[in-house]
Amino acid sequence: MFIRRTKIGTAKDGKAYYTYRLVKNVREGNKVRQRTLLNLGRHFAIEKEYWGLLCTLIKNRLSGQKSIFMEDVPEEVRSEANRIAYRLIVADGKLDKSVESKNKEGNYQEVDVDSLEVERPRTVGVENAGLKVMEEVDFEGILRGLKFNERQIAIVKGLVIGRMASPGSERHTYDWLCSVSGLGELLDIDFVDISHMSLYRASDMLIRRKDEIERELFRRIQGLFGLPCTVALYDLTNTYFEGDVSCNKKALRGHSKERRTDRPLLTLGLVLDSSGFVKRSQVFAGNISEVKTLEEMLEGLSAPLGALIVMDRGLCSEDNIEWLKSRGYRYLVVSRERGRCNLGDMDVSFESRSGHQIRVLVERDGDEQRLYCYSEAKARKEESMNRLHTERFEKELERLSSGLNKPRTTKALGKVQERVGRLKERYKQVSRHYQIEIVPDESGKRAAELRWERVPVENTRLTHPGVYCLRTNELHWDAEKLWRTYTMLTDVEAVFRSLKSELGLRPVYHQKEERCDGHLFITVLAYQFVQLIRHRLEIHGIKLSWSSIRELLSRHQRVTASFSRRDGKRLHIRKATELEPAQEKLYKVLGLDTNPGGRVTLVV
């Protein structure tokens, strides 16, 4: 066994290109020929002086012999020897998917059980599920139709499944593919032979064909489940950057939903259907006003006329509502009116999915109707918030008041007024319910006393907790149907939480605009396939977060078990670990192969 360098071409500047192969001499009759065991690629990085040692380590690894003086061997040589030995087992081993379980005679071999070694564990659970749902919507066919080649398709699958299994940057995904995941084995590709720049180039290709991929993927998901297209949910979130992003014109400071006011932001807008699948996504500048994004998103989506658009109060300006009316859309939004009416006798009463009582008062106003809703759960939450903020506000007032009677504390009238003003701004939800008076001393320059009185303002959260108003021009649906449709926006919030916490949307480490947009789009694609998995499970009553599903699946791995046989040869078996009961349940519902990659056997 030895390594051979072969010239494969010459560049225009005269530079020669070489590839490296692991070969061995094989006698065929009276002749000795060289047989290629493995193509090591153009980027084989081991120095020539270590080639002989590398081949020795590979032979020892396959035969089970212990190598001496390992402390003198560079780590990269040992790592490469282990990797090549594993690839030889997979490449030269006998692949047997399930025949062994059907063979009643069995496959008995005499081995030394004390020689057992279990090595190279690689995760295959999330990878197996991800490839299955990609196959269901023929994601590979979508990419192939957009002129992605086989290698690029494999890299895109690695990017998306990597985001599903181990969220992080594209560089993090590359490390995960090389050292943790068995996805390369399932795709018959070794990601170590691919540079990490290939992942960035694949991300660039994805963002350039984003609209076609997004549109075709949703069309296939819609056909797979027969999803209705009459309801569109629209909302925005943002993510922040790490590092300098001076070359990205969309990276701007704005209102951060993670309160990262110290960093530039990007804003992500999503239009979803009522089942939580993404119809369209768009990346906006970090400082964009939410109300200015609606027209661009819906026109880009080519949403059908008459579709019902559901939005939160941040997007439902009067201009947006008028635009929806002029385009023939129906809308269902939270009213921006500040007053909360006294509901009195309710028109409708029903229970939410969680068993809480919902009461609704309906008022018709021309071509629009308002639904004044009261939620027991929301009322309890707001009462608790009111109580907490009131206690904190009054405690701060007490601290300011007592300080006026202590030495070495600020008593200047102007400074005390500033402190009260800052305090009212910090607790503005409750401070408007207080009348505060600062009494000056005889000189008029110092504050002598601080007085306050609680005077609740009517029709506010303090006096009417749990009340909010919905506006809609849909006049044919009843109050319960409208309310339940609006509560789908909570699913959008769950989507954003999943994107941020479970799928690595934040932070962004890239500098270039295209790379930043690509990072967010990979996360959106990962969410689509996560939602496919969760939708399948929910149909069978399994309602778990993606974090829980991922934790269960990630414990399923492929390992290599090696034994020494009595005849001196080494037996290597590579297969997936047995499923635990909880894993088996998921695999059954999703229709997954319980032994992804099959069983590979090699005797050396």
Image (cartoon, rainbow, N blue to C red):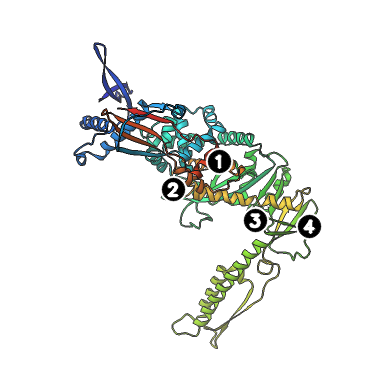
> Contact, CB < 8 Å: mark 3 with mark 1?
no
Q: Amino acid at mark 4?
A: Glu
Q: Is residue 296 visible?
A: no
- Say what amino acid the circle numbered 3 marks: Ser
Residue 467: quadrant of the picture:
bottom right
Q: Earlier in the sequence, mark 4 or mark 3?
A: 3
Q: On the rendered image, what quadrant is the N terminus found in?
A: top left
Residue for badge 3:
354
Count of residue discs: 4
- CB under 8 Å between callouts 4 and 2? no
Residue 170, picture quadrant: top left
Image quadrant in which the C terminus is located: top left
What's the amino acid at mark 2? Val
Q: For the residue carrying disc 4, how many other residues have a C-alpha within 10 Å: few (<14), some (14-19), or many (20+)?
A: few
Residue pointed to by mark 4 = 363
Cα distance between the residues tagged 3 and 2: 44 Å
Mark earlier in primary sequence (4, 2): 2
- Disc 2 crowd rating (10 Å Cα; few below 14, some 14-19, many 20+) is many
Q: Which residue is located at x 79 percent, y 50 percent?
A: 367
Secondary structure of the residue carrying numbered label 1: helix
Q: Which is in the foreground here, disc 1 or disc 4?
A: 1
Depth check: give the residue in front, 61 or 310. Answer: 61
Of marks 1 and 2, which one's residue comes earlier in the chain?
2
What residue is shown with label 1?
533
- Kindly report which numbered mark, 4 or 2, lies closer to the viewer in this rendering: 4
Disc on the earlier residue, 1 or 4: 4
**Residue located farthest toward the top when viewing the structure as drawn:** 30
Report the front residue among 403 and 500: 500
Task: Tell me the amino acid under the disc marked 1.
Answer: Ile
